[in-house]
Image (spheres, coloured by chain):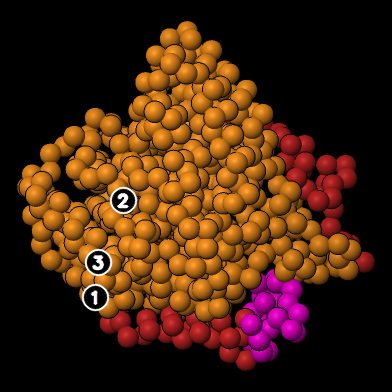
Amino acid sequence: MKPEQIASIAHLARLSMDAAEIPRYQESLTSILSFVGDLERAQTRDVSPMAHPLPGLVQRLRADVVTETDAHELYQANAPQVAASLYLVPKVIE
Amino acid sequence: MSLHTRSLFELAAGLKAREFSSVELTRTLLARIEAHQPRLNALISVTGESALAEAGRADAVLARGGGGPLTGIPLVHKDIFCTEGVRTTCASRMLDNFVSPYDATVVAKLKAEGMVMMGKANMDEFAMGSSNETSYYGPVRNPWNPRLVPGGSSGGSAAAVAARLAPFASATDTGGSIRQPAALCGITGLKPTYGRVSRYGMIAFASSLDQGGTLTASAADAALVLRAMAGFDPRDSTSVDRPVPDYVAGLEQPLAGLKIGLLREFFEKGLDPGNERCVREALKVYEKLGAKLLEVSLPNLALSVPAYYVVAPAECSSNLARFDGVRFGHRARDPKDLMDLYCRSRGEGFGAEVKRRIMTGTYVLSAGYYDAYYLKAQKVRRLIADDFAQAFAQVDVLMGPTTPEVAFELGSKTADPITMYLNDIYTIGANLAGLPAMSIPCGFVQQLPVGLQIIGRHFAEERLLSAAHAYQRETDWHTRVPPGYE
């Protein structure tokens, strides 16, 4: 892993990172990727990928009916900045 | 007999007979928390006032002859479970100020049973860690020796139960986070089958692996709580719609004829000889009780940790994308634009291990690397699940050590993440395959507890609990209390 790769991943992951922090992640991500690189050894031709641990289980969909009542005040009590029931963010469009 | 060393069954009998009240019991345990918290740091929040109010209500129900076997019994919840009106931090600066607007299903179910919440247990940040050292609120210390870690990520829950601050603590297990701290703290930990206990309101880390479960002194106590915690929940899309057996009634299943598979790879290099001796002694007890031992193999075991450290970070990077500094959680000061708001809020809110996993996940899911890492890991996951299925064609349960060694010193594995990750070598397989698994105390090495792991087929919790219970009737390891906490 090169420092610019770390900076690029951090940006993709929306994590601010000081230049001083980069070597620490460079070292650990390099060692993690080399460790998981062992997976290459496995013979996986004709093996189907497993995304879910229970065989045959399909994710359910719920009925398309209204089940929740409006509780925006309760939910917005945790928001950093709210005005007129709207979440505030820095200006996006000039 | 002191209240704090009693089993859940003994507490229930005492409450029912009005030998003591729930308020008295809760006061006793809150006083223990207050006395030992400075040393252990097992809790992030203590909810003493509401606990006493809940205990008072439980006493009123009990006085009318109402309530069930858990009514009036105090607990602590791992701080990953949302608790209505109570701060829920997931041990992260990101959620330091988050007050959950609703209860997790596990919390609601145990509340409905009349259990009393005394507080929220410390843990590794977002459950990412094996030593409880990644918590924003500082490490938890092992009650057996304060220089040592309690294990993780459910380290606060495990320390609280081991120090007899609470007779039960909820916990979660994504790669060993219930079983490993149970082993390191000398208590009983149960990770149920994936889908058995609702994940609704349990802050997500890796959604195809996360499972809530129990930390208690004994298997019998685990059976009693699991019966109340488990069951179908329409609010969790991967919850399994299948009846919950009466785990308590199932405890007395005979062991005779039980076929136990010894996992060959669990006894190979890396296992401390002292831990091996304790586990082999435990296996002799099972033989004496009429079980048959057979050696079985999981040929792909060595790949379980690498597969996990692709799948879990991938799911983590996706789940933790919700923390954007807009709707809840930490927000950076004076952001110059929306991108700056996202990046700095997340950069400041998450700790180093969480960032490392988010970045690993982001990388393995990115264009050009997806097939080589993520898809490959999912295929290896299938190989590991198939290995378990083949083993279970020959035997009823699998046994082996929970961890390669006893509790280690604080700071001793933090420099290199791989050293820390390898501590979960024996536990990760059950998560990848979705299998239920337990850790029960089976002896000591240099005055530190050792765990025996029991893994079962999907939904075989009853079998695991009865096998653990049979052992705990023959031995007293699970009743040992760390010096200073008797």
**Residue marked by disc 2:** B440
Magenta span: chief secondary structure: helix
Q: Which residue is mark 1?
A: B268
Q: Are there few (<14), some (14-19), or many (20+) residues within 10 Å of tag 1?
A: few
Q: Is residue B292 left or right of residue B217?
A: left
CB under 8 Å between discs 3 and 1: no
- Residue B33 shows up from this direction: yes
Q: Which chain is orange?
A: B
Both marks 2 and 3 on one chain: yes
Which residue is found at the position 47% from the left and 77% from the top? B418
Q: Chain of mark 2?
A: B
Identify which amino acid the numbered label 2 is placed on.
Answer: Ile
Location of the N terminus of chain B (image quadrant): top left
- Dot 3 falls on a residue whose secondary structure is helix
Between the C-alphas of marks 3 and 1, the distance is 10 Å
Q: Please, what is the three-letter code of the amino acid marked with disc 1?
A: Glu
In this view, B419 is above or below B259: below
* Quadrant of the rendering where the C terminus of chain B is positioned: top left
Q: How many marks?
A: 3
Magenta-drawn segment:
A3-24
Q: Earlier in the sequence, mark 3 or mark 1?
A: 1
Amino acid found under the numbered disc labelled 3: Glu
Instruction: Pinpoint residue B416: horizontal percent, then vertical percent.
Output: 52, 79
Residue that appears at 41% across and 73% down: B422
Q: The chain shown in red is which?
A: A
Q: Secondary structure at mark 1?
A: loop
Single out the mark in the foreground, 3 or 1: 3
Residue at horizontal 86 percent and vertical 65 percent from the top: B335
- Which residue was labeled with disc 3? B276
Looking at the image, which is closer to me, B51 or B37?
A: B37
